[in-house]
Image (cartoon, helix red, strand yellow):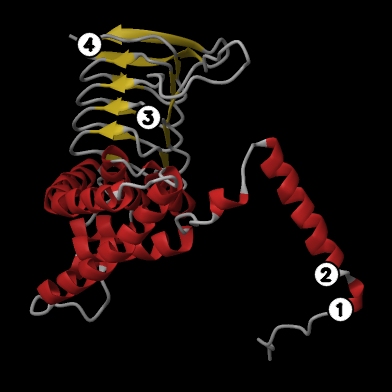
Amino acid sequence: MIDDDPPPAPPGHYWDIDAIASDLRSARDDWRAAHRRHAEHGAVGFPSRILLEKIMSAMCGALFPLRLGPSFVRHHNEDAFVAETLQTALARLYGQIRLELGYVLRDDATGQLESEAARIIGQFAAALPALRRLLDTDVAAAYAGDPAARSVDEILLCYPGMLAIIHHRLAHRLYQLGAPLVARIIAEIANSKTGIDIHPGASIGESFFIDHGTGVVIGETAIIGKRVRLYQAVTLGARSFPADDEGILHKGLPRHPIVEDDVVIYAGATILGRITIGRGSTIGGNVWLTASVPANSAVKQASALRNETVVEEVA
Protein backbone atom coordinates (compact mmCIF):
# COMPACT_ATOMS: atom_id res chain seq x y z
CA MET A 1 0.00 0.00 0.00
CA ILE A 2 1.35 3.43 -0.91
CA ASP A 3 1.57 5.90 1.93
CA ASP A 4 0.29 9.30 0.75
CA ASP A 5 1.55 11.13 3.81
CA PRO A 6 4.52 13.41 3.11
CA PRO A 7 7.85 12.43 4.69
CA PRO A 8 8.76 14.25 7.88
CA ALA A 9 10.78 17.43 7.54
CA PRO A 10 14.48 16.97 8.22
CA PRO A 11 15.85 18.47 11.44
CA GLY A 12 16.26 22.22 11.38
CA HIS A 13 19.96 22.08 12.19
CA TYR A 14 20.64 21.05 8.59
CA TRP A 15 20.32 24.72 7.64
CA ASP A 16 20.67 28.17 9.17
CA ILE A 17 17.38 29.82 8.22
CA ASP A 18 18.33 33.22 9.63
CA ALA A 19 21.55 33.33 7.62
CA ILE A 20 19.76 32.25 4.41
CA ALA A 21 17.01 34.86 4.86
CA SER A 22 19.64 37.52 5.51
CA ASP A 23 21.62 36.58 2.40
CA LEU A 24 18.45 36.62 0.31
CA ARG A 25 17.65 40.08 1.64
CA SER A 26 21.13 41.20 0.57
CA ALA A 27 20.56 39.76 -2.90
CA ARG A 28 17.27 41.66 -3.19
CA ASP A 29 18.86 44.88 -1.98
CA ASP A 30 21.71 44.53 -4.50
CA TRP A 31 19.24 43.97 -7.34
CA ARG A 32 17.12 46.95 -6.33
CA ALA A 33 20.16 49.19 -6.06
CA ALA A 34 21.44 48.08 -9.47
CA HIS A 35 18.05 48.73 -11.08
CA ARG A 36 17.31 51.88 -9.09
CA ARG A 37 14.30 50.32 -7.44
CA HIS A 38 13.06 51.32 -4.03
CA ALA A 39 11.00 49.35 -1.57
CA GLU A 40 7.90 51.43 -2.23
CA HIS A 41 7.94 50.37 -5.90
CA GLY A 42 6.65 46.96 -4.88
CA ALA A 43 4.44 48.14 -2.04
CA VAL A 44 1.26 48.04 -4.11
CA GLY A 45 1.87 44.45 -5.20
CA PHE A 46 1.64 42.88 -8.63
CA PRO A 47 -1.07 40.94 -10.49
CA SER A 48 -1.24 37.32 -9.33
CA ARG A 49 -0.72 34.59 -11.89
CA ILE A 50 -2.46 32.11 -9.58
CA LEU A 51 -5.58 34.27 -9.27
CA LEU A 52 -5.59 35.16 -12.98
CA GLU A 53 -5.54 31.45 -13.82
CA LYS A 54 -8.71 31.01 -11.75
CA ILE A 55 -10.27 34.08 -13.36
CA MET A 56 -9.55 32.74 -16.84
CA SER A 57 -11.05 29.36 -15.99
CA ALA A 58 -14.20 31.17 -14.86
CA MET A 59 -14.24 33.35 -17.99
CA CYS A 60 -13.99 30.26 -20.22
CA GLY A 61 -16.96 28.80 -18.36
CA ALA A 62 -18.96 32.01 -18.72
CA LEU A 63 -18.28 32.17 -22.47
CA PHE A 64 -19.10 28.49 -23.07
CA PRO A 65 -21.12 27.45 -20.01
CA LEU A 66 -22.43 24.08 -21.18
CA ARG A 67 -19.04 22.90 -22.44
CA LEU A 68 -16.42 24.63 -20.29
CA GLY A 69 -18.50 25.38 -17.22
CA PRO A 70 -19.07 23.03 -14.24
CA SER A 71 -21.07 19.86 -14.71
CA PHE A 72 -24.18 21.16 -12.96
CA VAL A 73 -24.85 23.79 -15.67
CA ARG A 74 -27.85 23.01 -17.87
CA HIS A 75 -30.02 25.06 -20.23
CA HIS A 76 -32.42 26.01 -17.45
CA ASN A 77 -29.72 27.55 -15.23
CA GLU A 78 -26.98 28.68 -17.61
CA ASP A 79 -28.08 32.34 -17.65
CA ALA A 80 -27.92 32.49 -13.86
CA PHE A 81 -24.56 30.72 -13.87
CA VAL A 82 -23.12 33.11 -16.46
CA ALA A 83 -24.32 36.20 -14.59
CA GLU A 84 -23.00 35.02 -11.23
CA THR A 85 -19.70 33.81 -12.67
CA LEU A 86 -19.08 37.01 -14.60
CA GLN A 87 -19.92 39.16 -11.59
CA THR A 88 -17.23 37.44 -9.55
CA ALA A 89 -14.65 37.03 -12.32
CA LEU A 90 -14.90 40.62 -13.53
CA ALA A 91 -14.66 41.98 -9.99
CA ARG A 92 -11.50 39.95 -9.43
CA LEU A 93 -10.10 40.93 -12.82
CA TYR A 94 -10.75 44.58 -11.95
CA GLY A 95 -8.62 44.06 -8.86
CA GLN A 96 -5.78 42.62 -10.91
CA ILE A 97 -5.95 45.49 -13.41
CA ARG A 98 -5.93 47.93 -10.51
CA LEU A 99 -2.75 46.32 -9.18
CA GLU A 100 -1.05 46.73 -12.55
CA LEU A 101 -2.11 50.35 -12.81
CA GLY A 102 -1.14 50.97 -9.20
CA TYR A 103 2.42 50.04 -10.09
CA VAL A 104 2.44 52.12 -13.27
CA LEU A 105 0.68 55.10 -11.66
CA ARG A 106 2.20 54.79 -8.19
CA ASP A 107 2.54 58.58 -7.89
CA ASP A 108 -1.12 59.06 -8.82
CA ALA A 109 -2.66 61.95 -6.90
CA THR A 110 -5.63 62.71 -9.13
CA GLY A 111 -7.71 59.53 -8.90
CA GLN A 112 -6.63 58.50 -12.39
CA LEU A 113 -5.98 54.94 -11.22
CA GLU A 114 -9.60 54.30 -10.27
CA SER A 115 -11.05 55.90 -13.38
CA GLU A 116 -8.62 54.09 -15.68
CA ALA A 117 -9.24 50.70 -14.07
CA ALA A 118 -12.99 51.31 -14.33
CA ARG A 119 -12.65 52.24 -18.00
CA ILE A 120 -10.66 49.13 -18.84
CA ILE A 121 -12.89 46.64 -17.05
CA GLY A 122 -16.05 48.32 -18.34
CA GLN A 123 -14.96 48.21 -21.97
CA PHE A 124 -13.63 44.69 -21.58
CA ALA A 125 -16.92 43.46 -20.12
CA ALA A 126 -18.90 45.17 -22.90
CA ALA A 127 -16.74 43.42 -25.51
CA LEU A 128 -17.48 39.89 -24.26
CA PRO A 129 -20.52 39.17 -26.50
CA ALA A 130 -18.56 40.19 -29.61
CA LEU A 131 -15.59 38.11 -28.45
CA ARG A 132 -17.86 35.09 -28.00
CA ARG A 133 -19.14 35.50 -31.58
CA LEU A 134 -15.56 35.82 -32.83
CA LEU A 135 -14.58 32.64 -30.98
CA ASP A 136 -17.52 30.86 -32.60
CA THR A 137 -15.85 31.47 -35.98
CA ASP A 138 -12.65 29.90 -34.63
CA VAL A 139 -14.55 26.82 -33.44
CA ALA A 140 -16.23 26.50 -36.83
CA ALA A 141 -12.88 26.84 -38.62
CA ALA A 142 -11.36 24.07 -36.49
CA TYR A 143 -14.27 21.75 -37.15
CA ALA A 144 -14.21 22.46 -40.89
CA GLY A 145 -10.43 22.17 -41.13
CA ASP A 146 -9.78 18.95 -39.19
CA PRO A 147 -11.19 15.67 -40.53
CA ALA A 148 -10.55 14.08 -37.13
CA ALA A 149 -12.99 16.43 -35.39
CA ARG A 150 -16.30 14.69 -34.69
CA SER A 151 -18.14 17.72 -33.29
CA VAL A 152 -17.74 21.35 -32.30
CA ASP A 153 -18.08 20.17 -28.70
CA GLU A 154 -14.91 18.12 -29.14
CA ILE A 155 -13.10 21.22 -30.41
CA LEU A 156 -13.89 23.17 -27.24
CA LEU A 157 -13.34 20.31 -24.83
CA CYS A 158 -10.19 18.77 -26.29
CA TYR A 159 -8.26 21.04 -28.65
CA PRO A 160 -5.31 22.94 -27.13
CA GLY A 161 -5.37 25.36 -30.05
CA MET A 162 -8.89 26.41 -29.10
CA LEU A 163 -7.93 26.96 -25.47
CA ALA A 164 -4.99 29.10 -26.59
CA ILE A 165 -7.21 31.15 -28.90
CA ILE A 166 -9.80 31.79 -26.17
CA HIS A 167 -7.05 33.08 -23.88
CA HIS A 168 -5.58 35.15 -26.69
CA ARG A 169 -8.84 36.81 -27.68
CA LEU A 170 -9.41 37.92 -24.07
CA ALA A 171 -5.77 38.89 -23.47
CA HIS A 172 -5.57 40.86 -26.73
CA ARG A 173 -8.56 42.98 -25.74
CA LEU A 174 -6.99 43.75 -22.36
CA TYR A 175 -3.71 44.55 -24.11
CA GLN A 176 -5.51 47.00 -26.41
CA LEU A 177 -7.33 48.63 -23.50
CA GLY A 178 -4.16 49.32 -21.50
CA ALA A 179 -3.47 46.33 -19.23
CA PRO A 180 -0.46 44.73 -20.99
CA LEU A 181 0.98 42.98 -17.92
CA VAL A 182 -2.29 41.25 -17.02
CA ALA A 183 -2.67 40.35 -20.70
CA ARG A 184 0.83 38.90 -20.85
CA ILE A 185 0.24 36.79 -17.74
CA ILE A 186 -2.94 35.41 -19.33
CA ALA A 187 -0.98 34.57 -22.49
CA GLU A 188 1.65 32.72 -20.46
CA ILE A 189 -1.04 30.79 -18.59
CA ALA A 190 -2.24 29.52 -21.97
CA ASN A 191 1.33 28.78 -23.05
CA SER A 192 1.98 26.68 -19.95
CA LYS A 193 -1.20 24.67 -20.59
CA THR A 194 -0.91 24.21 -24.37
CA GLY A 195 2.67 24.85 -25.51
CA ILE A 196 1.29 27.58 -27.79
CA ASP A 197 2.92 30.97 -27.28
CA ILE A 198 0.86 33.89 -28.64
CA HIS A 199 1.86 37.37 -27.54
CA PRO A 200 -1.26 39.35 -26.55
CA GLY A 201 -0.22 42.15 -28.89
CA ALA A 202 -0.62 39.97 -31.99
CA SER A 203 -3.64 40.83 -34.13
CA ILE A 204 -5.57 37.79 -35.39
CA GLY A 205 -8.61 37.79 -37.67
CA GLU A 206 -11.69 35.61 -37.53
CA SER A 207 -11.88 31.87 -38.27
CA PHE A 208 -8.36 31.17 -36.97
CA PHE A 209 -7.34 27.52 -36.57
CA ILE A 210 -4.22 26.07 -34.93
CA ASP A 211 -4.07 22.32 -35.63
CA HIS A 212 -2.20 20.29 -32.98
CA GLY A 213 -0.39 23.45 -31.96
CA THR A 214 2.53 22.45 -29.75
CA GLY A 215 5.47 24.76 -30.33
CA VAL A 216 3.59 27.49 -32.20
CA VAL A 217 5.06 30.96 -31.54
CA ILE A 218 3.38 34.20 -32.66
CA GLY A 219 5.18 37.46 -31.90
CA GLU A 220 3.89 40.73 -30.52
CA THR A 221 3.54 42.70 -33.76
CA ALA A 222 2.34 39.86 -36.00
CA ILE A 223 -0.80 40.56 -38.02
CA ILE A 224 -2.85 37.56 -39.12
CA GLY A 225 -5.81 37.84 -41.46
CA LYS A 226 -9.02 35.87 -41.74
CA ARG A 227 -9.32 32.10 -42.22
CA VAL A 228 -5.65 31.38 -41.53
CA ARG A 229 -4.58 27.88 -40.50
CA LEU A 230 -1.34 27.00 -38.69
CA TYR A 231 0.10 23.62 -37.77
CA GLN A 232 2.44 22.67 -34.93
CA ALA A 233 5.86 24.29 -34.46
CA VAL A 234 5.14 27.25 -36.73
CA THR A 235 7.04 30.41 -35.79
CA LEU A 236 5.98 33.92 -36.76
CA GLY A 237 9.00 35.66 -35.30
CA ALA A 238 11.37 38.58 -35.59
CA ARG A 239 14.49 38.44 -37.71
CA SER A 240 16.52 41.12 -35.93
CA PHE A 241 16.32 43.36 -32.90
CA PRO A 242 17.47 46.97 -33.50
CA ALA A 243 19.33 48.50 -30.56
CA ASP A 244 20.57 51.96 -29.61
CA ASP A 245 24.21 52.98 -29.10
CA GLU A 246 24.20 51.44 -25.62
CA GLY A 247 22.89 48.12 -26.89
CA ILE A 248 19.39 48.59 -25.47
CA LEU A 249 16.72 47.09 -27.73
CA HIS A 250 14.13 49.36 -29.31
CA LYS A 251 10.69 48.31 -28.10
CA GLY A 252 7.42 48.13 -30.00
CA LEU A 253 8.77 48.30 -33.55
CA PRO A 254 6.89 46.25 -36.20
CA ARG A 255 9.15 43.23 -36.57
CA HIS A 256 6.91 40.19 -37.09
CA PRO A 257 5.20 38.88 -40.23
CA ILE A 258 1.93 39.95 -41.81
CA VAL A 259 -0.09 36.91 -42.87
CA GLU A 260 -2.96 37.79 -45.19
CA ASP A 261 -6.32 36.03 -45.51
CA ASP A 262 -6.73 32.34 -46.41
CA VAL A 263 -3.10 31.32 -45.79
CA VAL A 264 -2.09 27.83 -44.65
CA ILE A 265 1.28 27.33 -42.91
CA TYR A 266 2.39 23.75 -42.36
CA ALA A 267 4.33 22.20 -39.49
CA GLY A 268 7.76 23.50 -38.60
CA ALA A 269 7.74 26.54 -40.89
CA THR A 270 9.72 29.53 -39.60
CA ILE A 271 8.71 32.94 -40.94
CA LEU A 272 10.81 35.85 -39.73
CA GLY A 273 10.77 39.62 -40.01
CA ARG A 274 8.28 42.21 -41.17
CA ILE A 275 7.43 40.39 -44.36
CA THR A 276 4.07 39.72 -45.99
CA ILE A 277 2.64 36.33 -46.86
CA GLY A 278 0.20 37.07 -49.66
CA ARG A 279 -3.43 36.08 -49.55
CA GLY A 280 -4.25 32.48 -50.42
CA SER A 281 -0.65 31.24 -50.11
CA THR A 282 0.51 27.89 -48.79
CA ILE A 283 3.77 27.63 -46.84
CA GLY A 284 5.19 24.11 -46.74
CA GLY A 285 6.56 22.28 -43.73
CA ASN A 286 9.99 23.24 -42.36
CA VAL A 287 10.35 26.19 -44.72
CA TRP A 288 12.62 29.01 -43.49
CA LEU A 289 11.25 32.23 -44.95
CA THR A 290 12.63 35.77 -44.58
CA ALA A 291 11.23 37.43 -47.73
CA SER A 292 7.70 38.39 -48.72
CA VAL A 293 5.78 36.19 -51.14
CA PRO A 294 2.93 37.32 -53.44
CA ALA A 295 -0.67 36.21 -53.21
CA ASN A 296 -1.50 32.62 -54.12
CA SER A 297 2.08 31.39 -53.73
CA ALA A 298 3.10 27.84 -52.84
CA VAL A 299 6.37 27.86 -50.90
CA LYS A 300 8.25 24.61 -50.31
CA GLN A 301 11.74 23.25 -49.79
CA ALA A 302 13.39 22.30 -53.08
CA SER A 303 15.96 20.07 -51.46
CA ALA A 304 16.34 18.83 -47.95
CA LEU A 305 20.11 18.62 -48.50
CA ARG A 306 20.55 22.15 -49.85
CA ASN A 307 17.73 23.54 -47.70
CA GLU A 308 16.63 25.78 -50.54
CA THR A 309 13.20 27.37 -50.69
CA VAL A 310 11.09 27.50 -53.86
CA VAL A 311 8.23 29.92 -54.39
CA GLU A 312 5.63 28.94 -56.95
CA GLU A 313 2.83 31.29 -57.89
CA VAL A 314 -0.45 29.48 -58.28
CA ALA A 315 -2.70 30.72 -61.07
What is the distance, in whole Å, between disc 3 and disc 2 at their CAs? 53 Å
Asked which quadrant contains residue 25, the reply is bottom right
Residue 108: numbered disc = none
- Dot 1 corresponds to which residue? 12
Mark 3 burial class by Cα count in 10 Å: few <14, some 14-19, many 20+: many
What is the distance, in whole Å, between disc 3 and disc 4 at their CAs? 17 Å
Residue 196 seen in the figure: no
Q: Residue at the right extreme?
A: 13
The amino acid type, in three-letter code, at marker 4 is: Val
Relative image position of residue 112 (x, y in whole percent): 30, 46
- Dot 4 corresponds to which residue? 314
What is the distance, in whole Å, between disc 1 and disc 3 at their CAs? 56 Å
- Dot 3 corresponds to which residue? 266
Asked if the residue at tag 2 contacts the one at tag 1, i.e. Cβ–Cβ closer than 8 Å, the answer is yes
Residue sitting nearer the eye, 178 or 163: 178
Asked which quadrant contains residue 141, the reply is top left
Point out the tag, 4 or 2, that comes first from the N-terminus: 2
Q: Residue at the front extreme?
A: 109
Residue at (64, 37) in percent of width and height: 36
Residue at (12, 48) in percent of width and height: 130
Q: SS for tag 2?
A: helix
Callout in the foreground (3, 2): 2
Relative image position of residue 76 (x, y in whole percent): 8, 79
- Dot 2 corresponds to which residue? 17
